[in-house]
């Protein structure tokens, strides 16, 4: 079973700064079936990135995903006020479709 | 645009059965290729996949919950359901329904419904 570990747990940054979030898999998986979601309080997750590096419809281009094998990264180039949230990675090809534990991006 | 809405009791007694439905609008639950899925999220914690049902009626669920989970389609009402047997306080969580097509992640989510297990 694939386990995803996200780091850091919390990232304290100011608007305009760059955020770099990591997601590491316990084993390599083919096909880059790695997604990133954003979740704000009281809301369901919102799909940002799929296939490790493809932006979902309507996602601003300040969000980008990269990586393959076991190491994946979500980068937000210039944080906007609405980007402060919790971010989850997910492997979406093999049961039990695991999520990482989440990374919170908070305002410094 | 597919939309989903969860419904069901907000309070369930320990050892009883949790039952939720998800109503689908903007698309047919019989459309081929969709994975009609349940997730949950305890307060302040991460997301957990509970299981899914395909249009064919075939199901799969998280091994950690498999013995207690049933997921079914109700095609006349364009709904799918979740039942979770023998609940404990550890099953208290926000429950989400979601869907995707094969090979994609989860594009569409309901708003979630909070279920509390308590006597």
Image (cartoon, coloured by chain):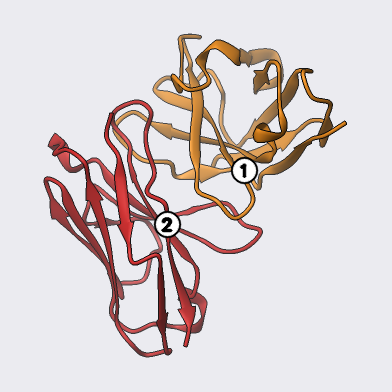
Residue B77, percent across and down? 71, 19
Residue where numbered disc 1 is placed: B110
Left or right, B1 with reference to A15: right
Q: Is residue A58 above or below residue B109?
A: below
Disc 2 to disc 1, C-alpha distance: 20 Å
The chain identifier of the residue carrying mark 2 reads A
Residue B45, percent across and down? 55, 51
Left or right, B32 with reference to B109: left
Camera sees residue B70: no
Residue at 82%, 37% (x, y): give it: B10
Residue where numbered disc 2 is placed: A102
For chain A, the rendered hue is red
Callout 2: 10 Å neighbours few (<14), some, many (20+)? many
Left or right, B15 with reference to A41: right
Could you say whether the residue bearing mark 1 is in a helix, strand or loop? loop
Q: Is residue A47 above or below residue A14?
A: above
Residue at 71%, 23% (x, y): give it: B87
| Colour-to-chain, orange | B
Residue A48, percent across and down? 38, 58
Residue B80 or residue B65, whichever sits in front:
B65
The chain identifier of the residue carrying mark 1 reads B
């Amino acid at each position: 079973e694939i386990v995803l570990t996200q780091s850091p747990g919390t990232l304290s940054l100011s608007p305009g700064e760059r955020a770099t979030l990591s997601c590491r898999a316990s084993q390599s998986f083919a096909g880059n079936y790695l997604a990133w979601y954003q979740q704000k309080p009281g809301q369901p997750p919102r799909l940002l990135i799929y296939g490790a590096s493809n932006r979902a419809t309507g996602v601003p281009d300040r969000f980008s995903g990269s990586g393959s094998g076991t190491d994946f990264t979500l980068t937000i180039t210039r944080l906007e006020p609405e980007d402060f949230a919790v971010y989850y990675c997910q492997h979406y090809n093999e049961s039990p479709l695991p999520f990482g534990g989440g990374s919170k991006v908070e305002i410094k | 645009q597919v939309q989903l809405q969860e419904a069901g009791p907000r309070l369930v007694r320990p050892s009883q059965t949790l039952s939720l439905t998800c109503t689908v609008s903007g698309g047919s639950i019989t459309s081929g290729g969709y994975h009609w899925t349940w997730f949950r999220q305890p307060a302040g914690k991460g997301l957990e996949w509970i299981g899914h049902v395909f249009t064919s009626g075939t199901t799969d669920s998280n091994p950690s919950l498999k013995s207690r989970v049933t997921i079914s389609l109700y095609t006349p009402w364009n709904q799918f359901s979740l039942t979770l047997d023998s609940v404990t306080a550890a099953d208290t969580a926000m429950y989400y329904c979601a869907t995707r097509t094969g090979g994609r992640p989860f594009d569409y989510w309901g708003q979630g419904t909070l279920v509390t297990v308590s006597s």
